[in-house]
Amino acid sequence: MSLRYEAVVRLLRDPDRAEIYSPKAIKTRLSVPGDKSISHRAIMLASLAEGETAIHGLLWGEDVLATKHMFEAMGVKMRVMDDRLTISGVGLNGLTAPQHVLHAGNSGTTARLVLGVLAGQDFFSVLDGDDSLVRRPMARVVEPLRQMGARIEGREGGRYLPLAMHGIRPLKPIVYRLPVASAQVKSALLLAALYAGGESCIEETVPTRDHTERMLRTFGVPISSENGRICLQGGAEQRFVSPGTISVPGDFSSAAFWLALAVMHQDAEIIIENVGINPTRTGFLEVLQAMGAEIEVISVSSVEPTGGTLQGPAASSSALVGEPVANLMARTSTLNGTTVAGEIIPRLIDELPLLAIVATQAQGRTIVRDAEELKVKESDRIRDVAMRLQAMGASVLATDDGWIIDGPTPLKPAELPPSSDHRIAMAFSIAALIAKGDRPTILHAPSVAAVSYPSFFEVLKNF
């Protein structure tokens, strides 16, 4: 073990814990794993398409593997070669009844989106998840799918997994206004709409991530999106054809950890290559820049599936899914407090735990509101973030829908309790890297990072 490795992080696998120290300086260039949201959708749509699809840059995390295993259980053939997953699509009507319960593991995206697919099948299936996922709300997807004709049974009237699905074909088209801002619900209904006998329209009052709409266009599905109304024509005439190749850009939510570290650390400059900067995902970047963070978008380019082009000096690594890509440079910054609320919340919901940590290093008060959704993620992130920040000496008050945080406050090393939530574990690894003291921060159960960022601690070794 090198001295450099010892200076930053020691992973002790038995018991599963990490000792994390603050390095004096961080100067590095890195890339991040493929986008988790896009990886899920790429596997699902390639499985339902006609023809063979090669997916490059896929995230090989536990959540995405749950999606892969689920479609293999429904008869889709897949093969792995190097870093490429090739899928032989079975067509919209080619899935077969699984012999066993379909298990989504810890992945809410898998569970909710697959419900939309299962609703349009002519077979019976059962969907389950791990101890965390069975506590997460599913009624927001179940109720509109029932309106489309699917028969769904489950705990507390279908509010929670496990769920038994009696699909129907064709489904009834639907016009549905989302009661909560949720890309997962929107995506589930768009996937179900492929099996409906007519036009379905989903209306959202607040824009949410639009990866599903972009990728559906890539697979040849005419889909309109105007003024928050997304419409799709389903039915037997619907052609769903593989584009041949999909390249998945780097995950912005993974890049966010390194952006946060760079702007908070006393002496840091980090360049992150080939990151997806879909504007429905980059609220965290906008808030950091508004707080005074020194972050540069070095290059960006994208070719939209409809033919439109965003100009830029770099060739896009994910042109076939219409996703803009950039290199990001972040460095030590002087930060100011801010208020984060309203329409921007869905565009940085996964990064809010990180934002809370950044706020402890900002001058003045930061207020986060309208983030009740954090309570029903892999953990109650409002409670868990506040408890851990308080243990590290921060001035933070948890509210019903966010936090009130005063800064700047030097964080101190602490022993933090284990969490089954991958984003909490990684966010507080970042907090540990700026904590000042003679002892390390002790992080229990770091291996949970494998859910979305399997190489996270390997990256820390190189600091």
Image (cartoon, grey):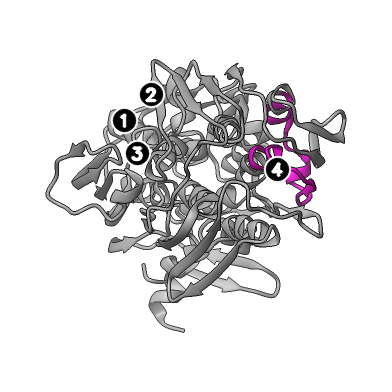
Residue at 60% from the left image edge and 27% from the top image edge: 197
Q: Amino acid at mark 1?
A: Met
Badge nearest the viewer, 1 or 4: 4
In the drawing, does residue 355 fall left or right of residue 419?
Answer: left
Q: Earlier in the sequence, mark 1 or mark 3?
A: 3
Q: Which mark is residue 291?
A: 1
Q: Quadrant of the C terminus?
A: bottom left
In the drawing, does residue 426 fall left or right of residue 210?
Answer: right
Badge nearest the viewer, 4 or 3: 4
- The magenta stretch is 115-143
| Mark 1 neighbour class, 10 Å CA radius: few under 14, some 14 to 19, many 20 or more | many
In the drawing, does residue 159 fall left or right of residue 185?
Answer: right
Disc 3: which residue? 278
Question: What SS does tag 1 mark?
Answer: loop
CA–CA distance between discs 1 and 3? 21 Å
Residue at 61% from the left image edge and 41% from the top image edge: 113
Q: Earlier in the sequence, mark 1 or mark 2?
A: 1
| Mark 2 neighbour class, 10 Å CA radius: few under 14, some 14 to 19, many 20 or more | some
Question: Viewer-proximal residue, 353 or 69?
Answer: 69
Looking at the picture, does residue 462 appear above or below residue 169? Answer: below
Farthest-out residue, left: 313
Disc 4: which residue? 121
Q: Amino acid at mark 4?
A: Gln
Q: Amino acid at mark 2?
A: Thr
Residues at marks 1 and 2 touching, judged by CB atoms closer than 8 Å: yes
* Image coordinates for residue 35, horizontal then vertical, percent: 44, 51
CA–CA distance between discs 1 and 2? 7 Å
Q: Amino acid at mark 3?
A: Asn
Residue at 79% from the left image edge and 36% from the top image edge: 160
Disc 2: which residue? 338
Residues at marks 3 and 2 touching, judged by CB atoms closer than 8 Å: no
